[in-house]
Image: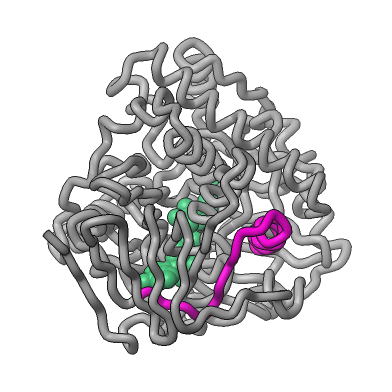
Amino acid sequence: MPMKSSLMTHELTAMPNFHAGTWYQHDLGAAGGDDALSGDARAKTVVVGAGLAGLSTALGLAERGEHDILVVDRGGPAEGASGRNGGFVFGGFSLDNLELARQRGADKAALMHGWTRAAVDLVRKRCKEMGVPVSEGSVLLADWFGKPERLRQFQERMHELLDFRLEWVDERTVPRYVASARYGAGLIEPGSFHFNPLAYARAIAARLRDSGARVASNAPVISMTRERSGWRLETPSAEIRADRVVLATGGYERRLWPRVQRAIQPIGTYVMVTEPLGERLDQLIPGGVAVYDTRFAFDYYRPLHDGRLLWGGRISVADRDPDAIRKLLYRDMLRVFPSLAGCRIDFSWGGWMSYARHQMPILGELEPGLWSALAFGGHGMAPTTLAGDVLAEAMTGDRTRLAEFETWGPDWAGGPFGRAAVQGVYWWKQLRDRLR
Ligand SMILES: Cc1cc2nc3c(=O)[nH]c(=O)nc-3n(C[C@H](O)[C@H](O)[C@H](O)COP(=O)(O)OP(=O)(O)OC[C@H]3O[C@@H](n4cnc5c(N)ncnc54)[C@H](O)[C@@H]3O)c2cc1C
């Protein structure tokens, strides 16, 4: 029986308030080519959403010899979280590593965590091939609570359980990486790095086009119909037929195919970028590292190549405007770097992350010909890359790795109640951080 769902065009063209211009766009300038989409179109695989989940899946297919692919986005490549994030590329999923081990057992957890570390290496390799610069500095986890024994314990658990080897940086050495009186000891993740994620996404889109696939911007999918053989999708200017659809709409869409997308909660997080700070930045972050800390509600920040500081933080269900974001994050920044009082903020923005209740990605063929690449949460650079490979493997006949993800399905995320609960939990954990 045909099944259809549809949306109003205006519901998809209005962007969130916090989608202000980013430093990433400023650094790169306007995007290059696009594949215009109008009239009747057909592709074996249509990917809805050109974030890193959709682009990596398309690239995974192209690398396995399938090129009849059309990727569509309501904006352009990496319009959503993938082009607005902190740019940390490191191992793991959004689900806490210890919880992953508790749920799946140490061996399985070690295997899956290892896949994300391999994905970090793959992103680095692709960046090298495509000429996308990456940092020399790695990612540093800094101790906020002055409890080195806890950090040590965490380091040992990661090694024992997941064969995940983090490098110890003692309290006296941390200032060589980041100079703030806030921190005690730290852990460096070998192999991790930071980069401009928009540059990476645009490079993948270009690589896809070179391989014969199409990537179309300004093409919001407003309806999807399951027919006897395959799928029919509509955008305001085109009707597309496909054998296979990949839903990779992140936290930006929950009504296109509600049976799957009802499993998503869109949760916001915010970023701002300072004016160029010159030598001051080298004094604050001499190690060129990307830093986050041991609180639940941690800050995340990193130096940019033009001497600015990118600062991120907060988790909220609110679509705040850029001024409000700036005020909120400025206070956080001064708590870590009081010497930056008075510095100008040139950019601020936000983005929606997409969370499932279980905090793991939702990957798989959820209905015949309908594939999901959703719910990467706040930790998506490596997992979206991994997902692209896992899904492409499954679509081309090998479902072994995909089977490991099928435990985490599209459970209802609670709608507005779920959102309220997420905000409540965040506030409670933020308060607990303060009390500690
Ligand atoms: C501010 C911020 C900071 C973050 N920092 C980090 C970090 O440092 N490191 C890290 O690993 N992760 C980070 N994350 C998380 C990471 O960015 C995400 O997990 C990842 O980008 C998710 O990719 P995605 O492709 O699933 O979603 P998205 O990138 O959001 O892509 C979804 C796409 O679908 C499109 N779309 C939606 N509906 C439709 C439709 N109907 N028709 C057509 N197109 C549609 C959207 O326009 C969008 O481009 C951060 C996230 C945010 C918001």
Tell which of 214 and 416 is nearer to you: 214
Looking at the image, which is closer to me, 407 or 367?
A: 367
The residue at 61%/29% (across/down) is 118
Tell which of 61 and 50 is nearer to you. Answer: 61
Looking at the picture, does residue 251 appear above or below residue 9?
above
Rendering quarter of residue 283: bottom right
Residue 219, position in %: x, y? 47, 78
**Extreme residue in the front direction:** 229
Could you tell whether 278 is left or right of 284 in the image?
A: right
Q: Position of residue 2 (x, y in %)?
A: 16, 63
Image coordinates of residue 293 in percent, x first then y, are: 53, 43
* 427 vs 161, nearest the viewer: 161
Q: Is residue 81 visible?
A: no
Q: Total number of numbered labels?
A: 0
Name the image quarter holding the N terminus.
Answer: bottom left
Q: Residue at x 59, y 65 (%)?
A: 214
Left or right: where 384 falls relative to 418: right
**Residue 320 sits in which quadrant?**
bottom left
Residue 253 placement, left or right of 191:
left
Q: Which residues are magenta?
A: 197-221
At horizontal 80% and vertical 69% (from top left) the residue drawn is 277
Residue farthest toward the bottom in the current orientation of the protein? 10
Vertical order, 254 against 186 (above or below): below
